[in-house]
Image (spheres, rainbow, N blue to C red):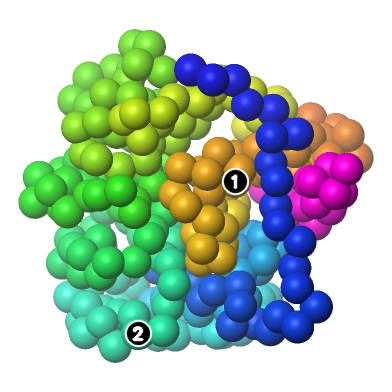
Amino acid sequence: PEYLRPADVRMPRRRHDSHKGTYGYLLTVAGSHDYAGAALLCVTSALRAGAGLVTAGCVAELRPLLQLSAPSAMALKLCDADVFDNSAVERARDALPGKTALAIGPGMTRRAAPELLALLLSSGLPAVVDADALNLIALNPDLRALLGPRHVLTPHPGEMARLLGRAVADPAADAHALAAECGCVVLLKGCATCISDGARDYMMNPGVPGMACGGSGDVLTGVIGALLAQGIEPLRAAAWGALLHGRAGARAQSRLGEVSMNASDIVTELPGAFMESMAAARR
């Protein structure tokens, strides 16, 4: 695999006459009664990663939290249950027009309706797919058949093992194999992060020990979703997202230490990571 470093990120400069519609419209489908924080981390990181508009598709009881904690995003109730059930399908269908990308999975739980995930995967929109959305794909072969080049899967080794039906052996080879089989982009998270679209393979070491905390993956999902919404092609969005996420984590660790930082600190440092990248692109 080709080895990538933070300097390889080349975020384009923004035009003076641009507006919020220029930078895409992301729909996140995340969270549940027990995992409200996952949805919030995904949404706030997407906002910090430059999506022009973000709507948080959520269960009813998460709306007040999202509206108060992420006022720059819109909170859309998809169902009244404690997790996404079948009633969320039609509301999600109505929400798809006008969106440019999807971020699916953080905090959904495995009790979420597979029919909702089927709708989202077959929508034609680029999507980053994480967490229990990956576990639902592993449990439902019909969902696996819906994957294609516009999808970015972001498993950690446990989720990857469920998708493969075995433990991870060689991360680079396994990411390549799953990407080739499903025809999508696979980002296998870890100390050595491996990314493949089945033809091109990349490896990087974007993280630091302080990022080994709950919610880090939810932040990455939001970052990649925002890049997809801005029209960046899936393989590049995955690679750049991982590098920017890792750089933000390193900045948080340098400020707070590897013991005390948490996932929300990664979100806080995303602006600095993006500014570093854009400054490098101008040189």
Q: Position of residue 188 (x, y in %)?
A: 43, 30
What type is the residue that disc 1 sits on? Gly
Give the distance between the C-alpha atoms of the residues marked 2 and 1, in whole angstroms: 25 Å
Q: Nearer the viewer, residue 230 or 187?
A: 230
What type is the residue that disc 2 sits on? Pro
Q: Which residue is drawn at 44% across and 72% down?
A: 100
Q: Which residue is drawn at 34% across and 80% down?
A: 96
Placement of 196 over or under 122, stated as above or below? above
Say which quarter of the image contains residue 172: top left
First in residue order: circle 2 vs circle 1: 2
Name the residue that disc number 1 marks.
Answer: 241
Does the magenta run of residues contain 204?
no
Q: Could one spot residue 207 in this view of the protein? A: no
Q: Do the residues labelled 2 and 1 touch (CB within 8 Å)?
A: no
Q: What stretch is highlighted in magenta?
A: 263-283
Q: Which residue is drawn at 71% across and 80% down?
A: 18
Residue 232: assigned label: none
Q: Position of residue 147 (x, y in %)?
A: 22, 50
Which element carries disc 2, helix, strand or loop? loop
Q: Where is residue 164 in the image (x, y as percent from the top left)?
A: 22, 27
Q: Residue at x 45, y 31 (%)?
A: 195
Question: Is 265 placed left or right of 179 in the picture?
Answer: right
Q: Position of residue 87 (x, y in %)?
A: 20, 82
Q: Residue furthest left?
A: 142
Residue 97: assigned label: 2
Number of disc labels:
2
Considering the whole magenta stretch, tell me its main secondary structure: helix
Q: Could one spot residue 119 in this view of the protein? A: yes
Placement of 168 over or under 279, stated as above or below? above
Which element carries disc 1, helix, strand or loop? helix
Q: Residue furthest top?
A: 169
